Amino acid sequence: MAKLWDKGFDNDARIDAFTVGRDRELDLYLAPYDIMGTMAHITMLESVGLLPSEDLAALLPELKKLYREACEGNFVIEDDIEDVHSQVELMLTRKLGDLGKKVHTGRSRNDQVLVDLKLFSRAALRKTVGKVQHLFEVLQAKSEQYKDVLIPGYTHLQVAMPSSFGLWFGAYAESLVDDMSVLKAAWDVTNQNPLGSAAGYGSSAPLNRKLTTKLLGFDNLDYNVVYAQMGRGKTERIIAFAYASVAETLGRLAFDCCMYTSQNFGFIHLPDVMTTGSSIMPHKKNPDVFELIRAHCNKINGIQNTIRLISTNLPSGYFRDMQLIKEVFIPMFEEMDDCLDIAAYAIENMEVVKDLMDDPKYKLAFTVEEVNHLVAQGVPFRDAYKQVGMAVQRGEFEYHGELHHTHEGSIGNLCNAQIASKMDAVLDSFTFDRVDEAVEALTK
């Protein structure tokens, strides 16, 4: 099968296999977006007089059929076809003859893959945003449910001060708010239109790039055509950084859960059916789910560095090095989403242990409470600190008071409603509605 760049000679088969790599496999993820980009492009070509209106009327229905096939998972890239762009053009040509060859006017595979990756990433980001939001809501619900159940807080893994399950669950909820802000920044970079940059130097065709921007629901343009091509790799790295931010929060939560389920801590329990056993030790009930979340998140954390190593220090213009980025980038979304899903499920079903702080080994967690009690009676802080410290040294420290933490974000004032408002403000800044309207208008 002739390639889009065919010049009348057959390429070396081994070179062909090496340079195509995993494109046929990975381009299936891009198929709906490649077709969507083609629909926008030819609609623009018709508007500037480069495609007759009757040709557009014939092409769009066939592209919409292909789009539905791709969305339903029925799109196939044939064995001797190089990539998704070639497959779409081939199918149009089979159906409509030479008319199918007109869709590439004013376009390069370079800006095709750029717009494909932007549209794919935009949809994947939106899916992840929903899953982060769900985990946030699960954590907030748990924070409220167990806000009065105390646990020891630690510094240096030494017992430090009283904390609570409300604080612990709520801390990870608020961490996700900041992660969502980073995802929004990635969305802003992603949701800009590179179509029309061609091979990185524009086109002498009178393209209307603002029209394709509107048709595809982008917020803005990548205006400079050289920069649009330089954005390949940079956009993926920025998105991977945002995913690493989520992964860092989730991985740290998973580490806590692994530690807190151990018998040495015993703060939380997973239902037996959510644990795994040992082939030799009959008593084992292991928190493998959290260990694997931690490992997946560590792996996701490394993706930004892999992309950086592939793309950093390349000069301006396009290079085939960029092809390899897809191999680490495209699978990242599903891996992150799976971790978010299973984390929310496990946390929803975990049990917390109450009355932990009644254990005498946590008695010293209340030393600061006693210092503050003395200060409230008029004892200078340094004197109160020394007085309590000497009592600890003599083994005479006792504390039987009640906790009175009232400031914002403390045990007695979690501010979960305010944290939820912060999350809502970030969510409201995403332009999902505009994207939905554009995609609906273009593809239906």
Image: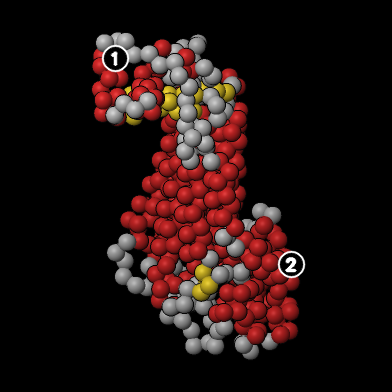
Q: Secondary structure at mark 2?
A: loop
User: x, y percentage for residue 271?
Assistant: 59, 21
User: Which amino acid lies under the numbered mark 2 shown in the image of this protein?
Assistant: Lys
Mark 1: few, some, or many residues within 10 Å (few <14, many ≥20)? few
User: Which amino acid lies under the numbered mark 1 shown in the image of this protein?
Assistant: Ala
Q: Is residue 346 left or right of residue 312?
A: right
State the separation of the CA atoms marked 2 and 1: 76 Å
User: x, y percentage for residue 395?
Assistant: 30, 10
**Going 44% across and 38% down the picture, which residue do you hit?**
251
Residue 329, relative to residue 277: is it above or below?
Answer: below
Q: Are marks 2 and 1 in contact (CB under 8 Å)?
A: no
Residue underneath mark 1: 391
Q: Secondary structure at mark 1?
A: helix
Q: Would residue 433 be visible to someone looking at this image?
A: yes
Instruction: Mark 2 vs mark 1: give the one in front.
Output: 1
Nearer-N-terminus badge (2/1): 1
Classify the position of the C terminus by image quarter: bottom right
Front position in the image: 421 or 322: 421
Residue 413, relative to residue 230: is it above or below?
Answer: above
Front position in the image: 7 or 280: 280
Front position in the image: 142 or 58: 142
Mark 2: few, some, or many residues within 10 Å (few <14, many ≥20)? few
The tally of labels here is 2
**Going 54% across and 45% down the picture, which residue do you hit?**
419
Q: Would residue 32 be visible to someone looking at this image?
A: no
Residue 444 circle label: 2
User: x, y percentage for residue 186?
Assistant: 48, 59
**Going 47% across and 32% down the picture, which residue do you hit?**
405
User: x, y percentage for residue 301?
Assistant: 40, 46
Front position in the image: 419 or 129: 419
